[in-house]
Structure formats: structure tokens, C-alpha cells
């Protein structure tokens, strides 16, 4: 294994026995031609096919390959997080293990990092996957994410990205947040660029993703917006909602009280409206209280949060 390698290639696998060896050979050819120190990190995300055996065989014959076996299928975000934690390269590149990303494009990412960018994101400019199940939901999600984050890139979803080590090591990944790393990293003031990459039809294996991801993506969009804008000041959002509800309740109740004192109505005829105004005030107070509790939790998060979204079963590497 190279000490303090210049480059780390991180690839998660889940039941990809048909693509592993070809991808490995192509990555090796590319990185060896670069003439820079490197390491390759393959993560087995709880595969149930022959992925583990193939990865172990490769690792035993290559001291620059590290294989991380997770205890179960934690998902792509957790698998990438495990790989990023192990990676020691100054430049860390992540990509999928299904051959839909071309290893031959790795030098383009490195070139942009060396030009001074902190994060280089791939852009599947000409997508070839299913129009209704993949492209339309992706376009909607990318448009919303660009608006929420203020990051002007077209393709948040692709895994094919390059990072400076100090950038990706400071991004906490949970749920399905790997596709939103540029948005999460934006709070650090990083310099981001997008480069076109090829998008090819998958020739081997079976896609693990479908329309079921839409629900998770929607909730992750909300999560990312909260993390970007309100993680360090949650009272700003909860307090604002609570303030609106409370003001509505006070105005509603105050209007009824004023009209009663002016003799314009009888309280007994508007008990439902009066109850509504009290409810609005109570709801407002609850939201403000939630904001205060969230403020306390955010402080705890920043100080003691050290839980990982994955569990490693073993790490295989050849120590020659």
C-alpha cells in the first residue's frame, strides 16, 4: 500500500460479480499510466453473490488494492462513506461499480482538481437510461437541488466525482445524501466545477435503482436544504413557523375579542373560532419549543457526533 498516496479511487459494489474484474483492470491501466502514487478502495456493501470472493482474490494479488467488507447492505451512501474514511489520497475519486462510469475519464477529473477546484462533479449530459423512470425524476430533482443550494450544476446524482481530501473528509453522509455532496460541501465555500462524462447503457448485471428512489430523494432534498441553511440555526426555521402560527392565533382571537367588546358579536356564537385561535397559538408555541430543542441538539451534534452509518466486518489488503 502506498504511503500518503496522491490518488484514491473509491468504488462501492453490491452484487456486481459480472463487472468487478473488468472495472479493476481498466482502473489499474488508467492509474498506472498517470505515473502518480495511488490506492484503490473497493467496498463490498453486503453482496450476496460472488462479489466477496472476487474482491478477496484481487486484493491478495495487489498491495495497492484495499477491500472493505461491510456487515450487511447499508446502501450506496454508507458504502461510499466507508470508502472515504479509509481513503488517504490527496485527491479522492468515487465512481460506480457497474461499468456505467468510464475509468478512462479519471484523468479529466484530476486535471480540474490540479487547476485549483475543490470538487469536480460529473455531468451525464447525454443520458441514455429510461426516460420516465430515471431521466424525468432526475431532471426535477436536479432543478430543485440547484435552486435550494444555489449550486449551478446539472447533475447532482452521479457518483462519479473528484474531491480534495480535506473537503470530502468534512462532509457527513447519511441516508441517500451522497448524490447531494456538492450542496453539502457548498457551506464550506468550496470551488466546484462540472465536467461532461459519458453515460452508457448498462451491459452487465442488473440496476439496483428504480422509481422507488423518488420518495427517498424528495425527503433527502428537504434534509439537504435544512443541513445547508438551518443546521447551525434550526430555531430560524422552526421559530419562524411558530411565530406565524402564534400571530395568526393572536390576530384571530384578538379580532373576535375586539368585535365582542364593540358589541358586534356574541362569544357564544363563535366558540369554534375562538378555539381555533387558541389552537394556533399553542401550535406556534410548540414549534418555537421544537426550535429551541433543535438548537440544543445541533450543539450536541457538532460536539459529540461520532456515529458511522455503516459497520465494517473486515478489511482485506496485501501487506507486501
Image: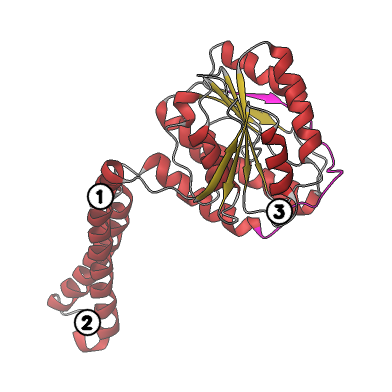
Label ID, residue 246: none
Report which residue position mark 1 lands on: 295
The residue shown at (54%, 46%) is 314
Residue closer to the observer: 299 or 63: 63
Label 3, label 2: how many angstroms apart (C-alpha)? 60 Å
Give SS at disc 3. Answer: loop
Q: Position of residue 44 (x, y in %)?
A: 63, 46
Can residue 22 be seen in the rendering of this structure?
A: yes
State the quadrant of the N terminus. top right
Q: Position of residue 172 (x, y in %)?
A: 44, 41
Q: Is residue 147 or residue 40 the one in the foreground?
A: 40
Question: 31 or 136: nearer the eye?
Answer: 31
Residue 95 against residue 18 in the figure, above or below:
above
Who comes first in sequence, dot 3 or dot 2? 3
> Against 76, is 29 above or below?
above
Image-based side of 293 in relation to 113, left or right? left
Q: Nearer the viewer, residue 115 or 4?
A: 4
Task: Give the label on residue 265, or none.
Answer: 2
Q: Is residue 272 left or right of 38 when viewed as pictured?
A: left
Is there any visible trace of residue 99 in the rendered image? Answer: no
Q: Which residue is mark 3?
A: 209
Q: Which residues are magenta?
A: 193-212
Tag in front: 3 or 1: 3
Please name the residue shown 74% across and 20% down the image: 30
Q: Decide whether residue 204 is among the magenta residues.
A: yes
For image coordinates 53% across by 12% down, the residue present is 116
Q: Position of residue 197 (x, y in %)?
A: 74, 28
Distance CA(mark 3)–CA(mark 1): 36 Å
Mark 3 crowdedness (10 Å alpha carbons): few <14, some 14-19, many ≥20: few
First-in-chain label (3 vs 1): 3
Amino acid at each position: 500500500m502506498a504511503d500518503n498516496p496522491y490518488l484514491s479511487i473509491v468504488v462501492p459494489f453490491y452484487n456486481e460479480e459480472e463487472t468487478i474484474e473488468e472495472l479493476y483492470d481498466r482502473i489499474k491501466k488508467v492509474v498506472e499510466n498517470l505515473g502518480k502514487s495511488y490506492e484503490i478502495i473497493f467496498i463490498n456493501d453486503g453482496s450476496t453473490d460472488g462479489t466477496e470472493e472476487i474482491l478477496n482474490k484481487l486484493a491478495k494479488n495487489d498491495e495497492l488494492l484495499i477491500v472493505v467488507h461491510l456487515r450487511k447492505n447499508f446502501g450506496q451512501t454508507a458504502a461510499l462513506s466507508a470508502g472515504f474514511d479509509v481513503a488517504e489520497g490527496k485527491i479522492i475519486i468515487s465512481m460506480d461499480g457497474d461499468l456505467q462510469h468510464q475509468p478512462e475519464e479519471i484523468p479529466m477529473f484530476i486535471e480540474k482538481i490540479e487547476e485549483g477546484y475543490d470538487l469536480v462533479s460529473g455531468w451525464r449530459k447525454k443520458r441514455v437510461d429510461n426516460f420516465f423512470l430515471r431521466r424525468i425524476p432526475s431532471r426535477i430533482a436536479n432543478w430543485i437541488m440547484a435552486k435550494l443550494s444555489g449550486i449551478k450544476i446539472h447533475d447532482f446524482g452521479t457518483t462519479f466525482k473528484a474531491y480534495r481530501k480535506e473537503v470530502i473528509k468534512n462532509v457527513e453522509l447519511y441516508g441517500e445524501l451522497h448524490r447531494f455532496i456538492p450542496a453539502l460541501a457548498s457551506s464550506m465555500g468550496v470551488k466546484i466545477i462540472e465536467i461532461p462524462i459519458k453515460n452508457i447503457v448498462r451491459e452487465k448485471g442488473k440496476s439496483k435503482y428504480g422509481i422507488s428512489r423518488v420518495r427517498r430523494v424528495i425527503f433527502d432534498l428537504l434534509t439537504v436544504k435544512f443541513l445547508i441553511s438551518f443546521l447551525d440555526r434550526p430555531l430560524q426555521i422552526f421559530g419562524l413557523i411558530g411565530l406565524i402560527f402564534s400571530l395568526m392565533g393572536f390576530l384571530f382571537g384578538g379580532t373576535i375579542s375586539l368585535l365582542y367588546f364593540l358589541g358586534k358579536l356574541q362569544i357564544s356564537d363563535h366558540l369554534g373560532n375562538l378555539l381555533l385561535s387558541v389552537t394556533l397559538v399553542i401550535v406556534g408555541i410548540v414549534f418555537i419549543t421544537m426550535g429551541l430543542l433543535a438548537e440544543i441538539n445541533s450543539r450536541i451534534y457538532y460536539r459529540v457526533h461520532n456515529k458511522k452509518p455503516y459497520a465494517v466486518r473486515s478489511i482485506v489488503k496485501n501487506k507486501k
